[in-house]
């Protein structure tokens, strides 16, 4: 059994930036179709008047300046993917703090600061309940930090290791064998079956394949006929000699 590695795409979503200022930088951002928010300013001259009149803050009735069309010269504004805000209105939908020039994450038309996005949407480890940003694993469709995904008995890490489970709980092969596996009649060691180990069962006794031997001549009895004499299993030849 193995655990799947979680895709490590969360960190890559935290690199959106709002700090794009200056006409030349804005021009390059637009030409390159960069995923940035543009910070600019309402201009006072007649040339900018028509552009200013086109402005309408996305917040509308909830505009923090009281008027979504307010375009006071010198006031900063934010533009992101054809939508516009007053700089003060460009804030996290959860904590309501202005994004300013900090990183942010858009989701379904809403804007989140990275902290609130992590708290609301990030994958959390089922063991410690802390956010998994990278190198996690999944087990039975549940997410774990690699360091949290451990053997139920010995607490050794199971990430990248073979393991088995019992009652929905993961165990390393050694602990599983010691705690739950049948034991070989010949060597008394556990028969785990992990890794393709084959074994022989007869009545209420079990043997590893390489332990299933004649009690007298030690020849392998795997795939051969055998006879039981009290607690021993013996080959037909040794059985004849014993009877004689």
Image (cartoon, grey):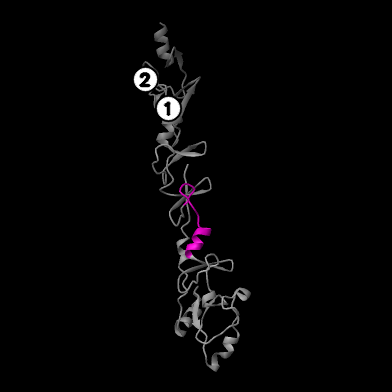
Alpha carbon separation for disc pair 1 and 2: 13 Å
For label 2, the residue is 218
Tell whether position 128 is magenta. yes
Instruction: Out of 218 and 14, give the one closest to the viewer.
Output: 14
The answer to whether residue 206 is visible is yes
The answer to whether residue 31 is visible is no
Question: As drawn, which residue projects farthest toward the front?
Answer: 66
For label 1, the residue is 209
Q: Residue at x 42, y 40 (%)?
A: 151
Q: Position of residue 16 (x, y in %)?
A: 47, 70
Judge depth for marks 1 and 2 and give the one in front: 1
Write down the region rendered in magenta: 114-129
Q: Quadrant of residue 219?
A: top left
Return the disc, 1 or 2, that comes first in the chain's sequence. Answer: 1
Count neighbours of disc 1 (C-alpha within 10 A) and say few if under 14, some if 14 to 19, many if 20 or more: some
Question: As drawn, which residue projects farthest toward the left?
Answer: 217
Q: Quadrant of residue 183?
A: top left
Q: Where is residue 87 in the image (x, y as percent from the top left)?
A: 51, 77
Q: Which residue is drawn at 44% across and 45% down?
A: 149
Count neighbours of disc 2 (C-alpha within 10 A) and say few if under 14, some if 14 to 19, many if 20 or more: few
- Of the 4 image quadrants, the one containing the C terminus is top left
Instruction: Out of 147 and 129, give the one closest to the viewer.
Output: 129
């Amino acid at each position: 059994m193995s655990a799947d590695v979680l895709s490590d795409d969360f960190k890559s979503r935290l690199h959106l930036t709002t700090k794009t200022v200056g006409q030349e930088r804005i021009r390059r951002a637009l030409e390159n179709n960069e995923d940035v928010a543009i910070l600019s300013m309402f201009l006072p001259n007649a040339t900018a008047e028509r552009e200013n009149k086109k402005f309408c803050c996305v917040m509308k009735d909830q505009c923090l300046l009281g008027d979504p069309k307010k375009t006071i010269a010198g006031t900063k504004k934010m533009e992101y993917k054809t939508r516009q805000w007053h700089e003060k209105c460009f804030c996290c939908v959860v904590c309501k703090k202005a994004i300013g020039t900090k990183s942010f994450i858009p989701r379904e038309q809403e804007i989140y600061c990275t902290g609130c996005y992590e708290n609301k949407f990030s994958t959390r480890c089922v063991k410690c309940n802390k956010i998994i940003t990278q190198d996690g694993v999944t087990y039975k469709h549940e997410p774990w930090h690699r360091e949290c995904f451990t053997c139920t008995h010995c607490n050794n890490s199971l990430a990248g290791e073979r393991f088995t489970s019992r009652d929905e709980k993961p165990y390393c092969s050694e602990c599983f064998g010691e705690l739950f596996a049948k034991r070989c009649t010949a060597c008394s060691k556990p028969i785990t079956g992990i890794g393709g180990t084959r074994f022989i069962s007869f009545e209420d006794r079990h043997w590893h394949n390489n332990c299933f031997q004649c009690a007298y001549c030690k020849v392998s009895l795997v795939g051969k006929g055998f006879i039981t004499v009290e607690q021993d299993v013996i080959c037909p030849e040794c059985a004849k000699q014993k009877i004689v």
